Amino acid sequence: MGEFELIDIIRTRCVHARNDVALGIGDDAALLDAPAGRQLAVCTDTLVAGVHFPRDTAPDDIGWKSLAVNLSDLAAMGAEPAWAQLALTLPDADGGFVERFAGGFAELANAHGVALVGGDVTQGPLTVTVTALGLVPRGMALTRSGARLGDAVFVTGTLGDAAGALELLRHREAGTGDRPDAFPALLARLNRPAPRLAAGLALRGIASACIDVSDGLLADLGRLCNASGVGAEIAADALPVSPQLASSCDAGTCRMLALSGGDDYELCFTAPATRTVEIDALLADAGCAATRIGRIVTGASVHVQDARGNPIDTPRAGWEHFPR
Ligand code: ADP
Ligand code: MG
């Protein structure tokens, strides 16, 4: 099977039509009609087999996740997704793999009205790079840099589920521990993250700053704080943990996974504390509850406190590719 047959498989499975695609897959570049008065939000993320997902992850899950992690970035900007590009590096021309991969990719793309408008296919170790393009009314995008003293810190959904699944997979590989009943639910959070797009849209004009949690809450909230020139205090007991995770590990492990596990794809955002009730209502409508977990303070770092206000040690901040 050649490169063009593989592209054809992708093209026939990702057929979401948008009338703002003047020219899609097939020419040297795509032509897109960006509407007046809106800004393009553009982001790229790469997934490498064995680094970003276990090598034995199902092809359709890899397809879903490669788009999901990018849509999560658009969600964090308050942008509405529109188009995507897909650069696929494959060890060999495995049409069956590409079919299933494209199926998972298309499932999420269709759910959010995203048109795949181009990409590339190359040979090498399994690597997926997706570029997502979204639209946001001019000046309305959420950024990392707007957090202010006195703002409350919120996070959508629950934290630590995906990292909990990874832990259980590792235990299984090492031949230790059994699989709790909650394993399938946790694994679904790892393999099929649901980008919080509706929440991102709802937070436009309300959140002062926003970031998606991909590398762990501490790491990503730390980035938000850096960009805003502030610090944050987080109440460990307020961290939202799913019943599935709580039933799978002890409280200390849950807390560690929620703080620094990564792969959550929830939104962490700040807003004036006076808007908490309004935020609760908006996010309930958006289908994912938000939990108030702390507040913005002076300084430059993120501190975690227990119920008595005593500091909790947090050794691991989150995932980094080139740790020093
Ligand atoms: P070129 O050699 O001009 O870069 P290619 O032969 O790589 O063109 O690609 C042909 C067409 O197929 C282009 O429109 C490109 O965007 C599209 N394409 C290639 N790979 C993919 C892919 N993985 N997903 C979607 N479209 C793709
Ligand atoms: Mg090319």
Image (cartoon, rainbow, N blue to C red):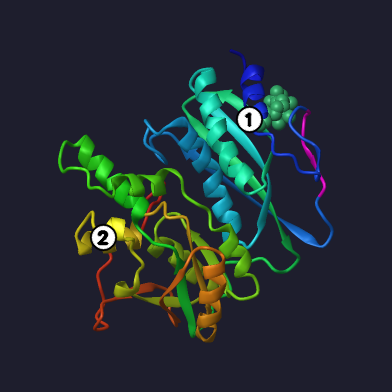
| Residue tagged 1 | 13
Cβ of mark 2 under 8 Å from ligand 1: the answer is no
Under mark 2, the amino acid is Ala
Seen at 26% across and 77% down, the residue is 306
Seen at 25% across and 41% down, the residue is 170
Residue 317, by quadrant, is: bottom left
Mark 1, Cα crowd under 10 Å, few <14 / some 14-19 / many 20+, is some
x and y, in percent, of residue 293 in the image: 39, 74
Q: In the rendered structure, which disc, 2 or 1, sits on the residue that comes first in sequence?
A: 1
x and y, in percent, of residue 187 in the image: 35, 45
Is residue 225 something one can see in this rendering? yes
- Mark 2 and mark 1 in contact? Answer it, CB < 8 Å: no
| Residue tagged 2 | 246
Gap in angstroms between the C-alphas marked 2 and 1: 38 Å
Say which element carries label 2.
helix
Q: Which residues are magenta?
A: 27-33
Up/down of 75 relative to 291, above or below: above
Seen at 18% across and 37% down, the residue is 174
Asked if the magenta segment contains residue 29, the reply would be yes
Dominant secondary-structure state across the stretch colored magenta = loop
